[in-house]
Image: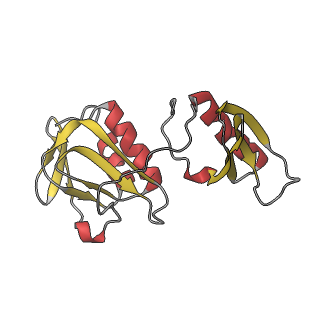
């Protein structure tokens, strides 16, 4: 089997969340951080033939990058990454040593909805770096939803804000910018 560019991109994103990955037979992939505070799951175009544990996802991606157009052949103990006569045998990790979701990730129904564009997300990451701010707050004041980047513990610290939607609710959700391990794109 070959992995699409989209799936390789997802693997790279998942490696930023957790260096382990437990592929389950089928086309659903999921990950969870070691702290269990960042998680993701998605469907991919490929169908994995068996359960296969990857202990170091960056090493696996590095092995794949040695080939222009790698072919993957999964077996119980290893995956052969090959192109022509060249081959790498990448051994599976036992599932018991991996940090992986133990059950399907189910999210509750959203109480607050807003659109976060790729430009908004990019600006949040940029301003967090420039302002050396670790937090992003999503704030609803009864009419506007605003993304605020700054230090939530320092009311007089530098901050950046941008309206991202409308609401009839009053709320404040604090997130660590470091936990926004999302692929570039638009989100609802």
Quadrant assignment, res 71: top left
Query: Number of callouts in the render?
Result: 0
Assign the N terminus to one quadrant of the image.
Answer: top left
Residue 41 in the image: x percent, y percent? Answer: 35, 47
Residue 156 visible in the shown view: yes
Residue 124 in the image: x percent, y percent? Answer: 67, 39
Rendered residue at 36%/52% (across/down) = 106
Q: Residue furthest front?
A: 168
Q: Residue furthest right?
A: 156
Rendered residue at 55%/52% (across/down) = 179
Q: Residue furthest bottom?
A: 96
Give the side of residue 119 with respect to residue 99, left or right.
right
Q: Who is closer to the viewer here, 116 or 13? A: 116
Residue 150 in the image: x percent, y percent? Answer: 76, 49
Rendered residue at 89%/53% (across/down) = 156
Residue 66 visible in the shown view: no
In the figure, 161 relative to 92: above or below?
above
Colour mapping used in the image: secondary structure
Quadrant assignment, res 117: top right
Give the side of residue 7 with respect to residue 50, left or right.
right
Rendered residue at 71%/45% (across/down) = 128
């Amino acid at each position: 089997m070959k992995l699409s560019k989209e799936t390789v991109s997802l693997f790279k994103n998942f490696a930023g969340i957790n260096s382990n990955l437990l592929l389950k037979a089928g086309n659903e992939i999921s990950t969870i951080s070691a702290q269990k505070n960042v998680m993701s799951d998605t469907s991919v175009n490929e169908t994995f033939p068996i359960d296969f544990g990857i202990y170091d996802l960056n090493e696996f991606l590095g092995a794949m990058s040695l080939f222009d157009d790698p072919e993957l052949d999964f077996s119980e103990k290893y995956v052969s990454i090959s192109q022509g006569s060249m081959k790498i045998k990448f051994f599976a990790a036992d599932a018991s040593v991996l940090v992986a979701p133990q059950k399907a990730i189910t999210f509750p129904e959203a109480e607050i909805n807003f659109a976060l564009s790729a430009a908004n997300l990019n600006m949040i990451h940029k301003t967090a770096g420039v302002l050396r701010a670790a937090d992003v707050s999503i704030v609803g004041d009864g009419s506007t939803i605003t993304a605020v980047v700054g230090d939530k513990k320092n009311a007089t610290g530098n901050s950046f804000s941008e309206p991202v939607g409308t609401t009839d609710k009053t709320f404040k959700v604090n997130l660590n910018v470091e936990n926004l391990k999302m692929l570039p794109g638009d989100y609802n």
